[in-house]
Amino acid sequence: MPDERYSRQILLQEIGTEGQEKLRQNNVAIVGVGALGTAAAELLVRAGVEKIILIDRDVVERSNLQRQLLFTEEDVGRSKAVVAKEKLHKINSNAAIHAEAIHLNSENVQLLQNADLILDCTDNIQTRLLVNDYCKKNKKRWIYAAAIKTSGYVMPILPEGPCLQCFMHESGVDTCDTVGVLNTITSSIAGMQVTLALKMMVKENVEPSLFYYDIWQGASKRITVKKNKKCQACQGNFTYLEKKENVKVIPFCSSGRYQIQGKPRNVQEMKKKWQRLGKVVDDGITLQFKDILLFRDGRALIKAKSEHEALATYSKFVGN
Ligand SMILES: [Zn+2]
């Protein structure tokens, strides 16, 4: 007999007893446990997906509480993956939740190998393109999702269909931390993403099109994505699987500062973004904001307790 907790879901003809059993058997990896990832993880666990891998390098911050559903004030400063695991276990003690508090890169991406389905809940394009390469190469299904300001995107990416690199490339410096995000869009996009995940797990066909939704305007559209003949991943050139990190970190002994070498930045653009968030000191050569001292060549000196924290600060405020 299936668990009574799923009775209302089993009543749905879209799920049924058979579908419910499929959900129980699937292993889902969630890459990024922020606004999208916490919402998606909670919905999946409540729906009866009992095998989940959570991947996130970050720690909970006070500014996350506005939209990251599983976290509370007392979690500030703790690993997102670990805290989410604890909360999810309280929701469903049958679930086997595996937490990986790491930065996913080409050297550890193999940990996705046991996943039947991967949910992209990250906030950066490099990790997405890495997941894209990994899934294309290993014929795995994944769901791209992104939300910023008041709108977002969702798209299921299937091994034989168009991939993310067919229409998306590295660009821009916008992150939630510089332009803001509404909590209802992250929850809605996560809801769309999980719905697609449930459909894929119960073996219903899904359309590999890009769904766009602006919750403030109440506007949505479905965009047909075609395979791009020039797409590297579709041609079997998996550059992101070979790529070593383009951000290098050098700890400055005992001073509590880390030097991070990233790509060159448009300092004026960065200054404008940062000024909306707080005080910026511009001495003509460097920009100083919070614990960051940024140089035009993309190098930054960051005051932090660990390399991990320095990298997280860099990726949040400077970009990836
Ligand atoms: Zn492609």
Image (cartoon, helix red, strand yellow):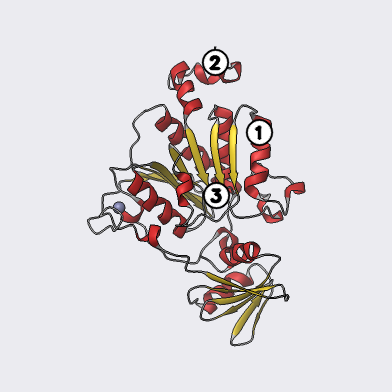
For the point 61% across and 26% down, which residue is it?
94
Q: Residue at x 43, y 22 (%)?
A: 14
Q: Earlier in the sequence, mark 1 or mark 2?
A: 2
Amino acid type at mark 2: Pro
Q: Give how far across and how far down residue 166 sits, in percent.
A: 31, 54
Q: What residue is at 68 percent from the left and 49 percent from the top?
A: 65
| Of marks 3 and 1, the one in the foreground | 1
Dot 1 beta carbon under 8 Å from ligand 1: no
Q: Earlier in the sequence, mark 2 or mark 3?
A: 2
Q: Nearer the viewer, residue 243 or 39?
A: 243
SS label for mark 1: helix
Crowd tier of the residue under label 3, counting other residues whose Cα lies within 10 Å: few below 14, some 14–19, many 20 or above: many
Q: Callout 1, which amino acid? A: His
Q: CA distance from mark 3 to mark 1?
A: 18 Å
Q: Is residue 252 above or below residue 127?
A: below
Residue 217's disc number: none
Disc 1 target residue: 89
Q: Which mark is residue 32?
A: 3
289 and 18: which is toward the camera = 18
**Residue 223 seen in this snapshot:** yes
- Image height of 178 relative to 194, above or below: below
Residue at horizontal 49 percent and vertical 53 percent from the top: 108
Amino acid at pointer 3? Gly
| Foreground residue among 231 and 95 | 95
Alpha carbon separation for disc pair 1 and 2: 19 Å
Q: Is residue 10 left or right of residue 159?
A: right
Identify the element where label 3 is drawn.
loop
* Residue 288: percent from left, percent from top: 65, 78
Q: Which residue is mark 2?
A: 2
Lower position in the chain sequence, tag 3 or tag 1: 3
